[in-house]
Amino acid sequence: MKKATIQLETLACPSCAMKIEGAAKSLSGVDKDSVKVLFNASKVKLDFDDSQTSMKDVEKAITILGYEVIKSQVK
Amino acid sequence: MQRFILGKKNWIALISGMLIFIGFVSELGFHREPIAFWAFAIASLMGVAPIAIQAYQALRVKVVSIDVLVTIAVMGAFLIKNLEESAVVTFLFLFGAYLEQRTLNKTRSAIKELTEMAPVSALKQMESGEFEQVEVDEVDVGDILLVKTGAKVPVDGTVLSGEGTINEASITGESLPVTKEKGSGVYAGTILENGTLQILADRVGEDTTFGKIIELVEEAQDSKSEAERFIDRFSKYYTPGVLALAIIVWLISRDVELAITILVLGCPGALVIGVPVSNVAGIGNGARHGVLLKGSEVIHDFSKVDTMVFDKTGTLTAGNPEVADKEIYGDHGKELLGYLASIEKESDHPLAKAVVNYLGDVPYYEIEKTDVIKGGGIVALIDGHRVAVGNPALMDQEQVHLSEKARKDIARFEANGNSLVLTAVDGELKVILGIRDQIRPGVKEDLKKLKKLGVKNLVVLSGDNQGTVDLVAREIGLTEAHGHMLPEDKSAYIQDLIDKGHMVAFVGDGVNDSPSLALAQIGIAMGSGTDVAIETSDLVLMNSDFSLLPHALGLTKATARNMRQNIIIAVGVVLVLLASVFLSEWMNMSIGMLVHEASILAVILNGMRLLSYRLKKFNL
C-alpha cells in the first residue's frame, strides 16, 4: 500500500468533492476507506495498491472529471 | 473539448449574460421576436454545455448532483420552448458558481496565508561540496543545507556551523529574534534575520513542526461534525429525491413546467456549503490569531464548555519558578549546598531547576544511588550520607523530625504561596527553600472574560501544596483549587467531572499532563508549538499565550452560532421555495434559481463575517 497526496486546482462546489471521491473509490486497487477529499484544502488523500493501479491511473480518473492535478506525492 | 468548455466557464457565463440582455432588449424594446428567440436559444445551449458535462461526469460515478437537476430542468424548458427561462437559469447557475468561487477563496484566505509561508527551496550541499538551489521536496534527512540571511529555514534541523538570529514567529507566534549557534535546533518556516548557518536536516516535509501545523489546520478545516455528516448523508438521498418528486408531479399533473420548476427549486446548494464555510472561516480566524482548532467537532464541544480545569505551573503561572525564601537549621558545612545542587541537577522538575539556578556555583559531588519518590522528591546516597530532598510528605516518610520552628516556617512559607523543597541529611532537617512562580500577567482579566462567556467552574489542579494553590486561586478568582495532585489524580478528577455531565476543557502545558489533555472533552495545550502537545490536544494556543483563551472560546461560540444560522437559512429557503411552487402564482424557474443562488451567497457572506471576529470588550 502506498499513500498518495494529490493537490488539485481550487475546488468550489461540495458536489465536486463528492464526484472526485466517487471516481477515486471506483478504481480497483484503491482502498475505499482511505479516500479523503479535503474540500477546502483542495487535496485528495488515499492509499492504493501499486500492483493493481498506478498513480497515473488515479490522476487520470480525476483529470477526466475536469479537475486539474497540480502536484502529487507518493509515499 | 470537455476541459476546454469547463475551463471557459466564466467566459460562457459572461457571453450568455450579454445574449440574454440582447434577447430581452430586442423582445421587449423592439419587438423583434426572431432575434430574441435566437439570442435565448444560443445562450441556453452555450450555458448548459458545461453544466451538462459536469452532470454526465457525476452520473458516471453514481452521484446525482445539482448539475443533474439543473441540466434536466434546462432541457425540459428548452423542449417546451420556454427559452427565456432556460437561458436565465443557466446564466444564473454559472454566474452563481463564479461568485461562489470568489467568495469561497476569501473565506479560505486566512489558512492560505499560513500554507504559503511554507518554504519552497533550499540550498543543498551536492557531492562536489558546492551548494545548489533545489526544491524543498528534494531535501532528505541527513542532507547539509546552507541558510543565508533573509532566507527561510527549509527543514527542521540542527546547526552545524555559523551563527545567526532567527525569527520564529511562524512556529511560536513570538517575533523576538532568537540566537542560534552550533548545536541549536532550527525549525522549517522560520526566517534567518541575520547571519549564515549550515544545518543538518533532521526532519523534512510533513514531518517538520511547521508541516505538522499545516497538515493539522488543513485536516481541521475539512473535518466534519456529526451534524455535517448527517447533512451529507441527507443530501445524498435528497437530490435523487427531488428528481423523483419532479417525475411523480409530472406523471400526475402532466405539467412539464411545474415539474422542471421543482427540479430547480429543490437544489440543496446552501445546505451543503453552509456549514463547511463557517468551519473554514472560524478555523482560519483562529490560525491567524495563534489558536489552532482541530476541526468542527472541537468547535462544537468547546462552544458548550462549562468547566475549565487548569494546570498551575506553566499555565496560570509563567513556569519559571524562583527561590524566594530560605530557612537554615543548625550549622551546616559547605558540602550541604553541594549535595543539594548535585541531586537537583539530575532532575528536570521545574522546582529542581529553580534550586540549581539559585545555588549557582557550588562544588558537585558524585551520587552513589538515587531513588525518585513519586509525588515526594528524591532520596540519594551521596558522599556516604543519606540525603532526602522534597516536600514535607517525603520528610514524614523518611522519619525526619520537624521541630516546632520548622513547622511554623513551613506554614508561613506556604501562606506566602511558596512551593517547598526541604533537605534532610541523615534524617536531620537542614534547610527549607521556598520557591515561587510568578502568575502570568493578565490571567485574572482573562479568567473574568471566560466567566462572562459562560464558563461556570474554573478549577486549578496542581501537584503543589494546598496553601500555594489556594493562594493562587484567591488571587486570580478561580472557583476551586486542589493541591497535592499527581498526574493520575488529575485525570481521575476530570473523569469524575465528565461523569457528572460537565463539558470539560483541560488547559495544560502538555509536558506532564498528556493523560488529562487526552481525557478531557477538549484538551487545550499551551504549546510553544514545538511539543508533542500539538498532536495530543484538540486546541493549541501558540506561543503559550494565555490571553488567546478567551478569544478561542468566543470564536468557537461565534462559529457554532454561525453554523446554526447557515443551516436555518438553507433549510428555510428550500422549504419556502418548494411551498411557494404549489401555493403561489408568481413562482417560476428563474426566480427560483435567483433565490437559490442568493441563498448560497448569503451563507458564504455570513460565514465570512467570522474572519474578522474579535472578542468584544467586556466591562470587567
Image (spheres, rainbow, N blue to C red):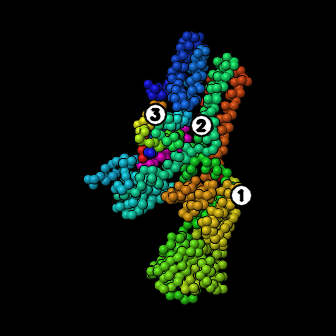
- Is label 2 or label 1 in front? 1
Q: Mark 2 points at which residue?
A: B273
- Name the kind of residue labelled 1 in the image: Lys
Q: What separation in Å lies between label 3 and label 2 (alpha carbons)?
A: 25 Å
Residue at 60% from the left image edge and 22% from the top image edge: B73
Residue B500's label in the rendered image is 1
Q: Quadrant of residue B97?
A: top right
Residue at 44% from the left image edge and 48% from the top image edge: B118
Position of residue B364 relative to residue B315, above or below, is: below
Left or right of B283 in this view: B572: right
Instruction: Say if mark 2 contacts mark 1, CB within 8 Å.
Output: no
Secondary structure of residue under mark 2: helix
Disc 3 crowd rating (10 Å Cα; few below 14, some 14-19, many 20+) is: some
Residue at 50% from the left image edge and 75% from the top image edge: B344
- Name the kind of residue labelled 2 in the image: Ile
Residue at 36% from the left image edge and 58% from the top image edge: B200
Q: What stretch is highlighted in magenta?
A: B100-119
- Name the kind of residue labelled 3 in the image: Ala
Q: What separation in Å lies between label 3 and label 1 (alpha carbons)?
A: 51 Å
Quarter of the N terminus of chain B within the rendering: top left
Q: Mark 3 points at which residue?
A: A61
Disc 2 crowd rating (10 Å Cα; few below 14, some 14-19, many 20+) is: many
Position of residue B238 relative to residue B468, above or below, is: above
- Image coordinates for residue B142, horizontal then vertical, percent: 36, 56
